[in-house]
Amino acid sequence: MTSVLNVDSIAAKDGTSPVGLTKQSAAKAWVNFNGTGTIAIRDSFSVSSLDDDATGRYSYNISAAMSDANYNCMSNCCQSSIATPDRCAASLPENSSSVLIGSRNTSNSDVDTEQVHGGTHGDLA
């Protein structure tokens, strides 16, 4: 016999927090931030802080740690001006709760970027 679950919403036990995802494939954390001047998060989910490590080098910290440092992360960087050379990004898990992002231009030089996006997938600890 099959079952059907019809609901209007699902909430955490406290009624206000987001529902914790554990083994689903939804993003466990993501961030959209300005990587030029004084860096600032525009919007995020499950990201506790953001660091400006050097020109074109950033890191973000995940609120709930991943099960280990073998999770998936991805990033993207771009400028708002068409006249600005293309940007490319690379992301790397630093440990179970931090992701590094690097931004380079077409000359392979580290550059700060206006639009930086990062996402994290994997199993939470």
Image (spheres, rainbow, N blue to C red):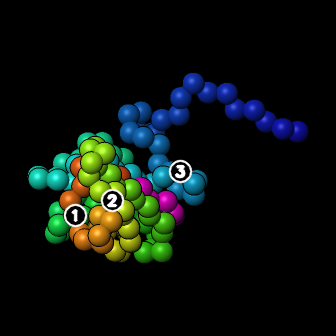
Amino acid marked by disc 1: Val
Residue, far top: 8
Residue at x 70%, y 32% (from the top left corner): 5
Query: Which label's residue is closer to the chain start, 1 or 3?
Result: 3
Residue, far left: 38
Q: Where is residue 55, by image quadrant?
A: bottom left
Between 108 and 38, the residue placed more toward the observer is 108
The residue labelled by disc 2 is 87
Q: Which contiguous range is marked in magenta? A: 119-125
Residue at x 33%, y 59% (from the top left corner): 87
> Distance from label 3 to label 2 (Cα)?
27 Å
Which disc is residue 26 wearing?
A: 3
| x then y, percent, for residue 72 | 48, 66
SS for callout 1? loop
In the image, which is nearer the foreground, mark 3 or mark 2?
2
> Distance from label 1 to label 3 (Cα)?
30 Å
SS for callout 3? loop
Between 10 and 107, the residue placed more toward the observer is 107
SS for callout 2? strand
Q: Are marks 1 and 3 in contact (CB under 8 Å)?
A: no
Q: Where is residue 2, by image quadrant?
A: top right
Query: Which label's residue is closer to the chain start, 3 or 2?
Result: 3
Q: Where is residue 82, by image quadrant?
A: top left
Q: Dot 3: within a 10 Å radius of its alpha carbon, few (fewer than 14), some, or many (20 or more) residues?
A: few
In the image, which is nearer the foreground, mark 1 or mark 3?
1
| x then y, percent, for residue 43 | 30, 42
Asked if residue 48 can be seen in this view, the reply is no
| x then y, percent, for residue 28 | 45, 54
> Distance from label 1 to label 2 (Cα)?
8 Å
Which disc is residue 111 wearing?
A: 1
